[in-house]
Image (spheres, coloured by chain):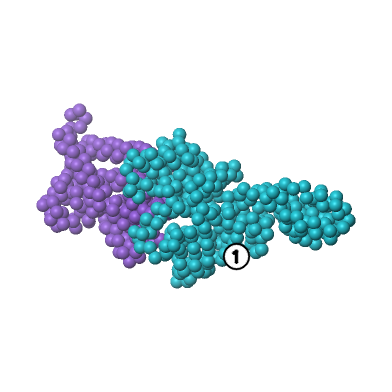
Amino acid sequence: MINFQQVHKAYRVNGEEIPALQPTDLHIDRGQVFGIIGHSGAGKSTLMRLINRLEEPSGGRIDIDGEDVTALDANGLRRFRQQVGMIFQHFNLLSSKTVANNVAMPLQLAGEMSSSQIAQRVSELLDRVGLTEHADKYPAQLSGGQKQRVGIARALATRPKILLCDEATSALDPQTTASVLQLLAEINRELNLTIVLITHEMDVIRRVCDRVAVMDAGIVVEQGAVADVFLHPQHPTTKRFVQESEQIDENEQRDDFAHVQGCILRLTFQGEATYAPLLGTVARETGVDYSILAGRIDRIKDTPYGQLTLALTGGDLAAALERFKAADVHLEVLR
Amino acid sequence: MTSLFPNVDWLEIWQATLDTLSMLGGSLLFTIVLGLPLGVLLFLTSPRQMFEQKAFYGFLSLLVNVLRSVPFVILLILMIPLTVMVTGTSLGVAGAIPPLVVGATPFFARLVETALREVDRGIIEATQAMGATTRQIVINALLPEALPGIFAAITVTAITLVSYTAMSGLIGGGGLGDLAVRYGYQRYQPDVMIVTVVLLLILVQVLQTVGDKLVIHFSRK
């Protein structure tokens, strides 16, 4: 669907080349929710804006549905942009237009529908995002979450095949964030819409994304399925993001470990295995004692997962490790 | 009435009021028609905007600054040949409008440029992302979003034009200001001065009030 080949971008500032994105290869499948995570200045915003060419690439090739979009002329680019919706951190709604007129705007600009068709489509969209009764209000009269829903309705107006979300929940409170993310997930399912979102919060990635790319200093340092990257981060930047989202303090953890004896290991369960009574069974069969040092049971998108850090003492340790390995869990021996 | 304002010829005051209003109306209309596109052009070609054109913007900016720095009294006299070419006369209401327009247009264009600069860049970006042409961005996003600022600019320009019309009396432009200078100042008739100044004050007051109302009406923030 979206294919980046050696795409890079540098800005010229006072005659000096400032690289924003190092040559990058990236592949995003149709219907996927693809997350890009990075701190500010990591180049994620540049990467996303290259897709609809709000930023022009300095080199490389971007194919979307087999078409090289870097080669589009002004007219082709306009038509292509109508197939790519975009929502923003600060919503970017027109304060001078009502909610309904904001949503109608992409359709009016495209100029392919009559005003009655547009009105029909707008009411459909407002119904979809649950804002029918606010149609005649102005953006200033809405809450942040409502404004982002208007943004989503506006982005979907031209029935795009791609939706770009630029830090779409970063200005919202946690509860509103959850409801906006849920709406995005629903839209992704119902319309089989490809969603590319950028964020600096691992939690956003965990809740809605299928795949994730981690960026640091203009480089994609790690990418893969969210569960893999989230549960088994490799790159230091990724590890930091995961720790931030789990509120783990490395020093504290080291301190905790120093207080316990025995073998320390981390078990990661995914899917059905999360609900299996594995710990008790193994303890009974092999005679080891366990204490739980840290743990979390949650969901990655729709898949339940658990991650427990245990200290094992006594009994037949080797047999216990064998039993864990045989079960449907991922095992890491930390000490 | 006669004893209070012995020198006031009310018919003449009435005529001068009409002259001032038609000079104001005519020059404001042309100032908006010319200044609005000029302001948009200044904005679009200015640094870091959609049609950044350093040399062109520099030239346009200089032209605007030159016209703005010429004192209006001088401009009035300098404009006489051009005015005769355009309107056939340099006298009366028709003769006053061209210099008024040339004096006010650069001023108004700068105010428009500033009002457009106030529009959130994110809104321009969102409109670009919808696949809008530059013309569509200007008409559908920039101008509607800047409308309160543009109405404020029109108000300030209209009031500036009121004071300019007073000076056009110098070249036989007529109007209330002219009356105030000729009768009130040159012939020492303070009653004429007071009446004309009060009428001008009322005019300015009305313009400001209507302008403020429009700004508030179009502000949705």
Residue shown at the point (26%, 44%) measured from the top left? B162
Chain painted in cyan in the figure: A
Residues B126 and B217: in front is B126
Name the image quarter holding the N terminus of chain B: top left
Q: Using the rendered image of the protein, determine whether residue B69 is visible from the camera's viewpoint.
A: no
Residue shown at the point (76%, 58%) measured from the top left? A325
Chain painted in purple in the figure: B
Residue with the mark numbered 1:
A221
Q: How far from the left and from the top, in percent, is residue A201?
A: 60, 53
Q: Using the rendered image of the protein, determine whether residue B4 is visible from the camera's viewpoint.
A: yes
Name the image quarter holding the C terminus of chain B: top left
Residue count near mark 1 (Cα–Cα under 10 Å), binned few <14, some 14–19, many ≥20: some
Q: Amino acid at mark 1?
A: Val
Work out which residue is located at the far front of the displayed protein and give it. A326
Q: Element type at marker 1?
A: strand
Q: How many marks?
A: 1
Residue shown at the point (69%, 49%) measured from the top left? A272
Residue shown at the point (40%, 57%) measured from the top left? A80
Residues A136 and B69: in front is A136
Left or right of B127 in this view: A296: right
Left or right of A1 in this view: A300: right
Q: How far from the left and from the top, in percent, is residue A305?
A: 68, 50
Picture quadrant of residue B68: bottom left
Left or right of A159 in this view: B7: left
Q: Chain of mark 1?
A: A
Q: Is residue B199 above or below residue B131?
A: above
Residues A67 and A9: in front is A67
Left or right of A223 in this view: B86: left
Q: How far from the left and from the top, in percent, is residue B13?
A: 18, 36
Q: How far from the left and from the top, in percent, is residue A291?
A: 82, 51
Picture quadrant of residue B3: top left
